[in-house]
Amino acid sequence: MASERQIAANRRNARKHHVDESAIDAEAFRHNADILIRIDHLIASAEARRDRVLAGIAFCRASLALRLCSRIVDDETGPLTEAKMSPKMLRARG
């Protein structure tokens, strides 16, 4: 990490050569563009995996809830039919 003294020297040097900080930022970005693109792809891939896992968890939770509700209803009132299902149970069933 650059010290205050190094930062000040870099700014003086940039002014001396008539280069503003945005030009330095742009050059740094251009120089590291390949790495940044790879990082962006890795992040997108991780997000896609996370979304698939979360969808799988949601499916398993809904499936488990439906099975548990079905067992409870079977024990109390006989088999679970669509007429006995709540709207939430029907959505979870798909």
Image: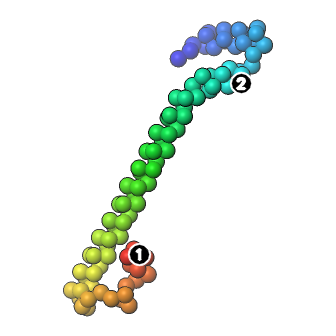
Disc number lying in front (1 or 2) = 1
**Is 88 left or right of 26, judged from the image as shown?**
left
75 or 39, which lies in front?
A: 39
Residue 22: % across, % down: 71, 24
Residue farthest toward the front in the current orientation of the protein: 34
- The residue located at (62%, 9%) in the rendering is 5
94 or 66, which lies in front?
A: 94
- The residue located at (32%, 65%) in the rendering is 60
- The residue located at (46%, 48%) in the rendering is 47
**Is 80 left or right of 16, judged from the image as shown?**
left
| Coloring applied to the structure | rainbow
Q: Which callout, 1 or 2, points at the residue further toward the start of the chain? A: 2
Q: Eyeballing the image, is 50 above or below 86?
A: above
Helix, strand or loop at label 1? It is loop
Residue 67: % across, % down: 27, 76
On the rendered image, what quadrant is the C terminus found in? bottom left
Residue 1: % across, % down: 53, 17
Residue 26 occupies which quadrant of the picture?
Answer: top right
Q: Amino acid at mark 2?
A: Ser
How many residues crowd around disc 1 within 10 Å: few (fewer than 14), some, or many (20 or more)? Answer: few
Residue farthest toward the left in the current orientation of the protein: 75
Residue 61: % across, % down: 33, 66
Q: Amino acid at mark 1?
A: Gly
Q: Which residue is mark 1?
A: 94
91 or 32, which lies in front?
A: 32
- The residue located at (54%, 34%) in the rendering is 37
**Is 4 left or right of 68, judged from the image as shown?**
right
Residue 84 occupies which quadrant of the picture?
Answer: bottom left
Separation of marks 1 and 2 at Cα, in angstroms: 53 Å
Q: Which residue is mark 2?
A: 22
Is label 1 in contact with label 2 (beta carbons under 8 Å)? no
Helix, strand or loop at label 2? It is helix
